[in-house]
Amino acid sequence: MNKANFIVDTDKCVACGKCVKVCPGGVLFLNHSKKAEIVDFKEFGWNGCWKCEHCLAVCPTGAISIFGHEPENSLPVADCATTAPVMDSLIANRHSCRRYKDKNVDAAIINGMLKQLASAPNGGNKQQVEFTLIDDKEQMKRFRRLAYSRMEELAVQGVYPKGFEREAYGDMKRWEKTVRADMLFCGAPHILIPHAPLGQGEPVQDVLIAGTYFELLCASRGLGAVMLTFPLGVLERMPDIRAMLDIPDHHYIGMIIGFGYPEIRYARGVQREVEQSRIQRPSFEKDDKE
């Protein structure tokens, strides 16, 4: 049974075998007519089709469709001569944004970014990362007030966020007068929390990669973003507030990403460099069999 709805236009297939060579599940082959074909498999995943769509993407003639996706509807391959400087600029010009406009980001922009996260690398293409999203600024204000109020109540009792003691907590409060208008979420009108179930696949890597990709997607659309870990320590002290996010207890959370329209625009990118001392280049002795 062709569970993947793998279809080959035999008139377009040139028997190059590229789809066979890039299939991570090893479920493709060239039949006696030298046309691409898929084997029967019991389930999607390690022992079957990985749902990666590499076959559709690699076919030079656009002969392959899969899961109802037609090759002509794919985005074209970018020209690295033009994309490399754009990516360099995005990375150099992304900054942790700690002040935002009191304005909702257009829903179409948010939905467009979430759609692109389906292409973020993840272990075995399991697509197990889930996303908790607050995309309404009024809802965000309510959630912030609840968490903030409880945080201050605990601080009065000498209970501070995990990893922070009284002095560090005091520093965070002091910074509210200058850099951070809101020590918890930096005043962000929206938050995105990628999370994934522990015990299967690569949840830690998958979550962190998804968060990193989302931050770059924000930068590419002129949005400010900030990767927040302090609120995670805060919410660990207040399980009832954390429960409002409907994130299962067995899910890994690596960060909370605040995002929105930035209040302050930066005029230029930074000029950081990776010191040579941070780069290790191992060498290996020549093998006699070489």
Image (cartoon, rainbow, N blue to C red):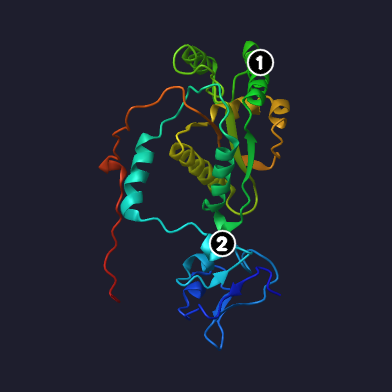
Between 199 and 223, the one lying in front of the other is 223
Q: Position of residue 249 (x, y in %)?
A: 70, 39
Label ID, residue 52: 2
Q: At 42% across and 22% down in the image, what residue appears?
A: 264
Q: Is residue 269 above or below residue 102?
A: below
Q: Which residue is mark 1?
A: 149
Tell me the quarter of the image containing the N terminus.
Answer: bottom right
Q: Is residue 81 above or below residue 47?
A: above
Tell me the quarter of the picture where residue 114 sits.
top right
Q: Residues within 10 Å of mark 1 (few under 14, many from 20)?
A: few
Residue type at mark 1? Ser
Q: CA distance from mark 2 to mark 1?
A: 45 Å
Closer to the camera in the image, 289 or 220 = 220
The front one of 76 and 234 is 76
Up-down relation of residue 34 to residue 193 (above or below): below
Residue 59 place in picture, x, y as percent: 48, 70
Question: Left of 228 or right of it: where is 240?
Answer: right
* Local SS, label 2: loop
First reached walking from the N terminus: tag 2 or tag 1 = 2
**Residue type beneath disc 2:** Cys
Residue 148 vs 287, above or below: the answer is above
Identify the residue at horizontal 50%, vertical 78% (top origin): 13
Res. 211 mark: none
From the viewer's perspective, is the residue at label 2 or at label 1 nearer? 2
Tags 2 and 1 touching, CB below 8 Å: no
Residue 166, how many percent across, how many down?
54, 15
Numbered disc 1: secondary structure: helix
Determine the residue positioned at 52% across, 85% down: 34
The extreme bottom residue here reads 32
Query: x, y percentage for residue 192?
Result: 59, 35
Alpha-carbon neighbours of circle 2 within 10 Å: few (<14), some, or many (≥20)? Answer: some
156 horizontally vs 276: left or right: right
